[in-house]
């Protein structure tokens, strides 16, 4: 069994801050209505916010594309162990967004979703 260097660092030094870990593969996908951004072993599940379409265009935080109301949606993530809720504006079409999004931007969104 191959050991990932990120997992090894976390096993030997469990308190290692997220920013000091070497970059891993960032996964960005839909899980039902939710959007998941994951860089094992870290995972953030963004739930859709129920509201009407955006009244004016907005910029997707993942891919940076300017989107009209029907093509974008607000999502929220609750931080573990905290009463803090973070919001992100993301494309409704996660597949196309994933192709345009840069890994370092997805990693920044993930960090916002797991760190208070």
Image: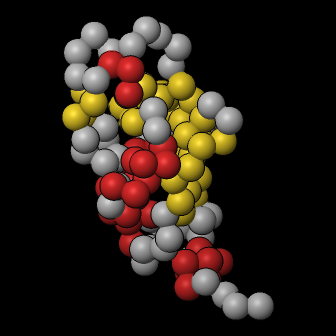
Regarding residue 82, the answer to whether it shows in the image is: no
Q: Position of residue 15 (x, y in %)?
A: 54, 67
Quarter that holds the N terminus: bottom right
At a point 51% along the width and 53% down the height, the residue shown is 28
Q: Position of residue 21 (x, y in %)?
A: 44, 73
Comparing 14 with 107, the one in front is 107
At a point 32% along the width and 60% down the height, the residue shown is 102
* Number of disc labels: 0
Q: Is residue 13 above or below residue 107?
A: below
Kindly give the residue lying farthest to the bottom in the view shown: 2
Q: Is residue 13 above or below residue 58?
A: below
Quarter that holds the C terminus: top left
Regarding residue 49, the answer to whether it shows in the image is: yes
Q: Position of residue 88 (x, y in %)?
A: 39, 33
Comparing 59 with 70, the one in front is 70
Q: Position of residue 48 (x, y in %)?
A: 54, 25
Comparing 70 with 7, the one in front is 70
Structure colour scheme: secondary structure
Kindly give the residue lying farthest to the right in the view shown: 1
Comparing 46 with 53, the one in front is 53
In this picture, residue 76 sits left or right of residue 65:
right
Q: Is residue 107 above or below residue 112?
A: below
At a point 44% along the width and 65% down the height, the residue shown is 17
At a point 54% along the width and 36% down the height, the residue shown is 46
Q: Is residue 96 above or below residue 40?
A: above
């Amino acid at each position: 069994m191959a050991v990932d260097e990120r997992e090894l660092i976390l096993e030997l030094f469990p308190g290692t801050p997220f920013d000091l870990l070497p970059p891993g593969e960032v996964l960005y996908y839909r899980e039902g209505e939710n959007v998941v951004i994951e860089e094992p072993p870290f995972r953030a599940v963004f739930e859709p916010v129920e509201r009407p379409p955006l009244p004016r265009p907005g910029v997707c935080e993942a891919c940076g594309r300017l989107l009209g109301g029907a093509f974008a949606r607000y999502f929220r993530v609750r931080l573990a162990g905290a009463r803090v809720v973070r919001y992100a504006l993301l494309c409704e079409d996660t597949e196309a967004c994933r192709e345009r999004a840069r890994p370092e931007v997805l990693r920044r969104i993930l960090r916002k979703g797991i760190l208070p």
